[in-house]
Amino acid sequence: MMKLDPATGKELWRYQAGVKYESIPYTAACKGVVYYTSSTIPQGQPCHNRILEGTLDMRLIEVDADSGKLCDGFGYHGQVNLMKGMGYSVPGYVSVTSPPPIVNGAIIANHEVLDGQRRWAPSGVIRGYDAETGRFLWAWDVKKPNNHGEPLEGQYYSRGTPNSWSIMTGDNELGQVYIPMGSAAADYYSAMRSPEENAVSTSIVALDVKTGTPRWVFQTVHKDVWDYDIGSQPIMIDLPQGDHTVPAIFIPGKRGQNFIVDRRTGKPLSRVVERPVPTDTDVPGDERSPTQPYSPDVPAFEVTRDLKETDMWGMSPIDQLYCRLKFRQAHYEGEFTPPQIHKPYIEYPGYDGGSDWGSIAYDSTTGILVGNWNNTPMYDQVITRKKANELGLMAVDNPNYRPDPSASEGNGPQADTPVGISVSPFLNKYTGMMCNAPPYGMLTAVDMHSRKVLWQVPFGSARANGPWGLATHLPLTIGVPLNGGPIITAGGLIFVASTTDNLIHAYNLKTGKEIWNDVLPGGGQATPMTYEYNGNQYVAIMAGGHHFMQTPVSDDLVVYALPH
């Protein structure tokens, strides 16, 4: 952690958490820190104002906001060990990857568990801690709903339960926290999941911050085997309803479906329709849900609902022919095509489709909601245990595991189950280009008064993208893959980076016209922030880069001053 002068960038203090390299799951990055003002320590005393960080090696750390020194009264000399009660693990298997919100004095801690490793992975338990002292308050263990205490000596939180790795949303007024949930461990195989796990997987769960008891659950996918965990932060909005507003939660997701529910009750504020979906799978014993929820009255973040062979694309007729052949060779029945063993299957939208962890932005003055999102399919195949063993796939906690930098990110052993999984983007393997036609990234504005799309544009240029990993340097706006979210200023500007063209952009909120951009020193796979200091407004972004998206990695914080 570092504290910088907001006008000059001069370093004022630095705290080194000492996270070791082996504890880094993917990229040495976090999504933010939390500012907290103590109610027990007088103003002017150390640790009256604090900064809270969740680390990749599973610690909560509080430091004094003025000096950067540890708050000795928090936990054990300023730190809380989140591995307590987790049972066996290895460094990097579980990590805090999002800032823990503080709601009515309670720190709410979630964590990532690496995908695709084994069915009995470390627990996805959610826990509450006192923000003043670090004292344990409660736990929400999906399989032990009536036990909110810490495990006794020699016991552990339930293994393999759904985890929440993304950004939670705190509601001080209602005393609850909205948790975006993933699925139970072994993402692409559901036959071994319990009814309790199925009930909360790929859902928003509202927990009481005093007790850890669920108040309501809203599920966006039933029996998820597509890695459609909710990566987007659920956003609190006051939804326009005629001449009044209703306290609501807007729920974007990887499918591109957008749901709106009453944050007091979890009841839908727009129609939710259960529609029949394909169920034909050759994965033994793993039955699919016959229906899935849709939100027909809220504009979806989608280019098309289903892919067709004519949607295949290439730089030349040969490239297009290759992709059309791959399309024909795969099993595909439209959205929610069930996983298959006998042949590859197409997952569209892919697990990085729709809206991911950057989520959306909402301007309460105009009622305009803005989201940037992906239009990217995946090309997957369930593989037998024998095949997984032949490929050398093994869980990270296997003593014989050795990292393979050349391996696909999505290949997973799914140990403790009968099958593994092979996952990759739907690419032309010879050029590295996507097989579906662009755009791959979009920026959309929705008028929440009318629930209609105000404008929609392809987002991102080809300047840093091209075949064989070579940049074309062409400033053509085609819409490129992205990760990270937008912000909206009071002056009616959208600031957003996220794209693989390594640019940060400014758009007019009402027209969608791009009015400015700048080249970042690294990939802008982050959400910008804006602040005021001494009468000046600034926009800042961490240009850290992204491992999966292969954008340049840097340590640079870039800050722009807005004109008066």
Image: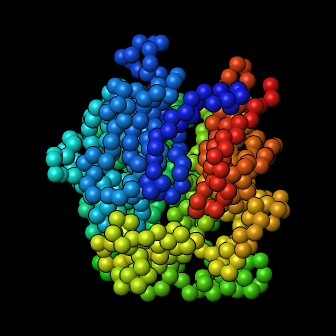
Q: Which residue is at a point 67% across and 29% down the rendered structure image?
A: 10
The image quarter in which residue 374 lies: bottom right
Left or right of residue 175: residue 408: right
Nearest the viewer among 33 and 492 is 33
Nearest the viewer among 440 and 392 is 392
Total numbered labels:
0
* Image spot of residue 500 (x, y percent): 69, 58
Q: Quadrant of the C terminus?
A: top right
Nearest the viewer among 477 and 562 is 562
Q: Which residue is at a point 48% across and 54% down the rendered structure image?
A: 21
* Image spot of residue 502 (x, y percent): 72, 53
* Image spot of residue 273 (x, y percent): 45, 58
Left or right of residue 63: residue 430: right
Left or right of residue 133: residue 529: right
Q: Which residue is at a point 71% across and 36% down the rendered structure image?
A: 559
Which residue ends up furthest to the left in the rendered image? 153
Q: Which residue is at a point 25% across and 62% down the rendered structure image?
A: 194
